[in-house]
Amino acid sequence: MRTVQRTDSSLLRDAAAIAAAMVAVGASFGAITVAYGLPTWVPFLMSTLVFAGGAQFLAVGLIAAGNPIAAVLAGLLLNARHLPFGLAVAQTIGTRWRDRLIGSHLMTDETVAFTLREPDPVRRRRTYWLIGVTLFTSWNAGSALGVLLGGATGDPATLGLDAAFPAGLIALILPSLRDRDTRVVALSGAALAVLLTPVLPAGLPVLCALLGLFALVVPRRRRPAPPAAPTAGRSAVSPASAESAGTSAGPAGNSTASAASAEREVSSC
Amino acid sequence: MLIAAILTLAVGTYTMRLAGVVLRDRLDLSDHLQRVLPMAAAALLAALAITAALMDGTELAGVARPAGVTVGAVLAWRRMPFVVVVVAAAATAALLRLAGLP
C-alpha cells in the first residue's frame, strides 16, 4: 500500500513539473500569436483543437507570414508522428469508443513518453489519462495567460525551458533504453534525424527516425542460421523471425509482416 | 481562410491521432511487430529530444541548450527524480545564457 501511494505521488509530482513548464511555454505561444497581430481567438482555438505545441508555433509563424496553406501542410507533417504513437498506446487507451475519441486528442509526445515508461498496464492507463488531462489543461491555461499578459510573459528560453523539454523526454525514455534492441533502434534513429534536420523540412527528420528499426534486421543477417521451424510461441520474438525478415524469403507469417512494415516505413520517409 | 486553416490542421492532426489508436485493432500484428511498436515510439521520442537539444531550426543550437540537456541527461542516467532532471536542465541553460553564452 505504501509503495503504491509513493509511486502515485511521484507521478503527480512529475505531472506538476511538466505542467508548470507547459504553462510557461503555452503562455509564450499565446503572447507570440497576439504579437503577430492575429486575432485573440486564434490561440484559444488552436490550443483546444490542435493541441500540439510544436505544430502550433510553426503554424502561427507561417500564418502570420501570410501562408496559411504552408501552415497546414507543415503542421500536419510535424504531427504525422502521432500515427505511430497511436499504434503504440492503443492498448493503453482501450477499445471503448468514448475512450478512443477523447483519449486520442490527449496524445502528445510527453503523454506517450510518460505512458510507455510504466510497465504495469493498469498504471499505464492511469498515467496516460492523468498526464493527458494535466497537459491539456496546463497548455490551454498557459495560452490564455499569454494572451492576457502579452509581452510580459517573456521568452521561455530565458528560463531555460527549451532545455527542460528535451531533458524531460530523455529522462522518460531512458528506462526503455536499458533494453539493447530498443537502445540501438532509438539511438540510430535519433542520429539519423539529427543528420537529416538541416536538409529536410521540419517533421520529416523525426519520422525518418523510424528507419532506426532497420538496425534490428541488419546485424542479424550475419549470425549463423538458427534451427528451422521453431515452435510458434517462441518464433515470434526469437532472432529467427527478425533475421528472415531481412532476407524477404521468410516462410513464417511473422517475418513477411515485419518486412512489409519495414518497407512501409521507408516509403513514409 | 484563417479559421479554415486552423480547422484543417486540427481535423488532420486529430485524424492521425485517432488513426493509430483505431488501426491497432484492425491490424493483425505478429508478436514480433507488437514488440517493435514501443521501439518505434522510443525512436521517435529520442529523435525529438535529441534534435530539439542540438538543433535550432535547420542550424545547430548554441551552447546553453545542449549543455542544459546534457546535465539533465546525466542526472536522469544517475536515476535522479524527473523533477530534478527538468529543473537542473532549465537552470543550467538559463544560467549559461545569463553568463552571456548563446
Image (cartoon, helix red, strand yellow):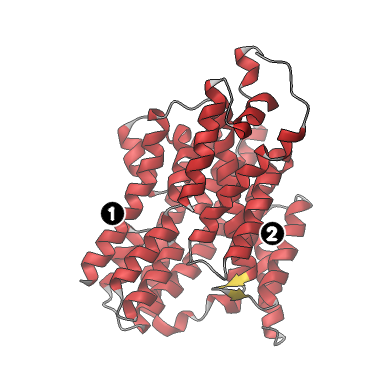
Mark 1: amino acid: Val
Q: Residue at x 66, y 72 (%)?
A: B65
Question: Can residue A20 be seen by looking at this rendering?
Answer: yes
Could you say which quadrant of the image residue A249 lies in? Answer: top right
| Crowd around label 1: few <14 · some 14–19 · many ≥20 (10 Å) | some
The numbered disc on residue A29 is: none
B29 or B69: which is nearer to us?
B29
Q: Position of residue A48 (x, y in %)?
A: 33, 59
Tell me the quarter of the image containing the N terminus of chain A. Answer: top right
Could you say which quadrant of the image residue A69 lies in? Answer: bottom left
Q: Which of pointers 2 and 1 indicates the residue nearer the eye?
A: 1
* SS label for mark 2: helix
Mark 2: amino acid: Val
* Residue that numbered label 2 is attached to: B85
| Crowd around label 2: few <14 · some 14–19 · many ≥20 (10 Å) | many
Question: Can residue A94 be seen by looking at this rendering?
Answer: no
A99 is higher (above) or lower (below) than B58: above
Query: On the rendered structure, is A159 left or right of A220?
Result: left
Q: Position of residue A231 (x, y in %)?
A: 64, 12
Query: On the rendered structure, is A37 left or right of A5?
Result: left
Callout 2: residue from which chain?
A: B
Q: Are marks 2 and 1 in contact (CB under 8 Å)?
A: no
* Residue that numbered label 1 is attached to: B11
Q: Give the total number of marks visible in the rendering.
A: 2
Callout 1: residue from which chain?
A: B
| Cα distance between the residues tagged 2 and 1 | 35 Å
A17 or A236: which is nearer to us?
A236
Find the residue positioned furthest to the bottom: B100
